[in-house]
Image (tube, helix red, strand yellow):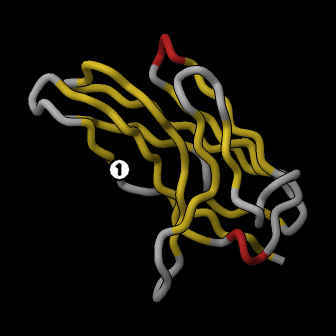
Amino acid sequence: QVRFVESGGGLVQLGGSVRLSCTASGSIRTLYTMGWHRQVPGKQRELVAVITSDGTTNYADAVKGRVTISRDNAKNTVNLQMNSVKPEDTAVYYCLARARTTVVAYVDNYWGQGTQVTVSS
């Protein structure tokens, strides 16, 4: 119902920057919150940052001051700029789109396939 194109990520040097982008498409009637979560093996997926359709943002404490999330509503795109990366930022980053589609009546969370970010020293 909802398709994602995620880009960015890869190998990033300690202290460097990385930019992730995600575009959602498909049977979207209304797109609400978009954002990014991340997960490392053996741990639960955790919030990185989210942004609502009116631009309200929420950041995890672990990334505050280092991460900026932005959004282009016309393109259903969300971007994540992460600076001063740390080893603990190594994870698979998943794009989130909370949406109402033309297929089902209720609002639900949809997830991208994930993109790996690895911080190297």
Q: Nearer the viewer, residue 2 or 105?
A: 105
| Outermost residue to the top | 74
* The quarter of the displayed image where residue 102 is located: top left
The residue under label 1 is which amino acid type?
Answer: Trp
Q: Position of residue 68 (x, y in %)?
A: 76, 40
In the depicted structure, whether residue 102 falls above or below residue 84 = above
Q: Is residue 3 left or right of residue 82?
A: left
Pinpoint residue 39: horizontal percent, then vertical percent.
51, 71
Work out whether residue 45 or residue 3 is closer to the camera in this orientation and state it: 45
Tell me the residue that label 1 is attached to.
111
Q: Position of residue 12 (x, y in %)?
A: 75, 62
Residue 101 in picture, x, y percent from top left: 20, 27
75 up-or-down from 9: above or below: above
Residue at 58% across, 70% down:
91
Residue at 32% x, 21% y: name it.
Answer: 30
Q: Secondary structure at mark 1?
A: strand
